[in-house]
């Protein structure tokens, strides 16, 4: 139900041991690279059909277009050290994946309820990129933001292709300001809607796309399913829990309790920075429960479900699942999941709805863990296996749409005049 990219007492130790791990794993890395090169050679000799490899589960009416993606014609091979255990892969990626250096320029948007969200743009892109460059909005997972490794790797790959990239940091995340007694939730799409409208206003000649992970993916897919006139031109969902009831069930089993406690710690840390905003709230709020939450469910019961008007935490989960939105998605959407994801269970994937919607595609890898995908050319410390596929898909959609075309709704009224949306810019 969330992204495992949280502060941990083990994080510093893991970073210190990363150089030693690189040395120990170098022989394996070289062997795997040779295997990949060999596989590419066989694919190019004319004897192999141009089809996604059989190690991948592919579904969707437009799955044929994936045959042209070079990265999908090779078998999915998790890095050998981690292939046998989803938890090892998940934790290794969270703590030892390299963190690229990115200079950001922060822009804070004021929301209609006097809240605030932070947009982190790549510093200097206003001058370096043309006004009609495609824009990619990135939505991290629960408590995640522009500081996370998987976010920065995706940002740099898109930027290397000439795309303008912005990270949408939800309220309280990545030190985004919190100005009201309200954070964000799996169900709430209002902040994302405002961000998309703001980006469209700033770059009216550009096509706008979005990619989300974990809870960010759930919010993104819910947004996509809310209207037939979606302002985005294409989107990618990764590690989406889809069915939050199923995800919550699995979150309390066995080793998953470790993730649950880690994410609860991060939620408490964000809450405590802004605790004074929640003093004296009446009604059904249970502020002590949220402030001392041992699990994500505790936090959602004490605070989140009340803030967003749900009768109970179970009511919140059952009515916030993006699996219900898939059938209404009206733009190209690629969903990438790992079959062994401990946080976004494979049994929660709405496979039949994805197959029935001509706009949707699904790729399921046999391994990958949650936000792990330690495979591909840059394994084990570089970008996730998914990054090249994401860009191949988005560039295909962009070329299909027409690189100079505008979004069809860019000039339509959006209820609140876009020029009146207040915002504050700052550098980070």
Image (cartoon, rainbow, N blue to C red):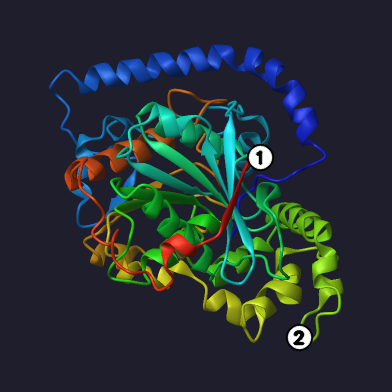
Q: Quadrant of residue 26?
A: top right
Q: Quadrant of residue 12?
A: top right
Residue 217: give x, y in percent of width and height.
Answer: 48, 56
Q: Dot 1, how many residues are within 10 Å of its Cα: few (below 14), some (14-19), or many (20+)?
A: some
Tally the marks. Answer: 2
| Contact, mark 2 vs mark 1 (Cβ under 8 Å) | no
Residue at the far front in the pictured view = 420
Residue 254 is at least partly visible in this image: yes
Image-based side of 322 in relation to 102, left or right: left
Residue 339 is at least partly visible in this image: no
Q: Please give the name of the residue rendered at 80% of the width and 29% of the height, measured from the top-left corner.
A: 13
Q: Nearer the viewer, mark 2 or mark 1?
A: 2
| Residue that numbered label 2 is attached to | 284
Q: Is residue 301 above or below residue 82?
A: below
In depth, the one of 280 and 242 nearer the eye is 280
Residue 247: give x, y in percent of width and height.
Answer: 57, 64
Of the residues under marks 2 and 1, which one precedes in the sequence? 1
Residue 83: give x, y in percent of width and height.
Answer: 53, 35
Q: Is residue 309 above or below residue 358?
A: below
Image-based side of 9 in relation to 237, left or right: right
Q: Please give the name of the residue rendered at 29% of the width and 49% of the height, measured from the top-left corner.
A: 58
Quadrant where the image shows the N terminus? bottom right
Distance of label 2 from label 1 (alpha carbons): 36 Å
Quadrant where the image shows the C terminus? top right
Marker disc for residue 91: 1
In depth, the one of 37 and 405 nearer the eye is 405
């Amino acid at each position: 139900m969330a992204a495992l990219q949280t502060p941990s007492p083990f994080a510093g130790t893991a970073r210190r041991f990363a150089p030693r791990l690189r040395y120990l794993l170098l022989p394996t890395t070289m062997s795997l690279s040779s295997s990949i090169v060999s596989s590419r050679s066989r694919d190019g000799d004319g004897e192999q059909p141009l089809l996604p490899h059989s190690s991948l589960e592919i579904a969707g009416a437009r799955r044929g277009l994936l045959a042209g993606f070079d990265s999908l014609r090779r078998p999915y091979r998790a890095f050998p050290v981690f292939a046998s255990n989803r938890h090892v892969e998940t934790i290794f990626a969270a703590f030892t994946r390299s963190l690229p250096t990115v200079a950001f320029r922060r822009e804070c948007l004021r929301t209609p309820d006097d809240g605030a969200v932070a947009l982190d743009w790549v510093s200097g892109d206003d001058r370096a990129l043309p006004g009609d460059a495609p824009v990619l909005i990135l939505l991290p997972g629960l408590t995640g933001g522009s500081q996370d490794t998987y976010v920065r790797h995706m940002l740099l790959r898109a930027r290397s292709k000439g795309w303008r990239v912005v990270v949408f940091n939800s309220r309280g995340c990545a030190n985004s300001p919190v100005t009201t007694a309200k954070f964000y939730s799996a169900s709430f799409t209002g902040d994302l809607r405002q961000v998309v409208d703001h980006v469209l206003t700033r770059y009216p000649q550009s096509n706008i796309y979005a990619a989300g992970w974990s809870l960010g993916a759930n919010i993104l897919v819910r947004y996509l399913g809310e209207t037939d006139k979606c302002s985005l031109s294409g989107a990618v969902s990764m590690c989406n829990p889809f069915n939050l009831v199923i995800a919550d069930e699995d979150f309390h089993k066995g080793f998953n309790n470790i993730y649950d406690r880690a994410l609860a710690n991060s939620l408490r840390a964000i809450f405590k920075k802004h605790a004074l905003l929640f003093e004296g709230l009446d009604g059904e709020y249970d502020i002590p429960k949220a402030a001392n939450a041992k699990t994500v469910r505790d936090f959602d019961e004490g605070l989140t479900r009340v803030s967003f008007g749900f009768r109970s935490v179970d009511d919140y989960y059952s009515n916030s699942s993006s699996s219900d939105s898939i059938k209404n998605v009206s733009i190209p959407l690629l969903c990438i999941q790992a079959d062994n994801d401990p946080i976004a269970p494979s049994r929660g994937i709405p496979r039949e709805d994805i197959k029935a919607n001509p706009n949707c595609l699904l790729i399921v890898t046999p391994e990958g863990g949650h936000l792990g995908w330690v495979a591909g050319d840059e394994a084990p410390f570089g970008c996730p296996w998914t990054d090249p596929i994401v860009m191949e898909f988005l560039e295909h959609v962009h070329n299909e749409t027409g690189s100079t075309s505008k979004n069809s709704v860019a000039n339509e009224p959006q209820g609140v005049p876009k020029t009146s949306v207040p915002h504050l810019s700052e550098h980070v």
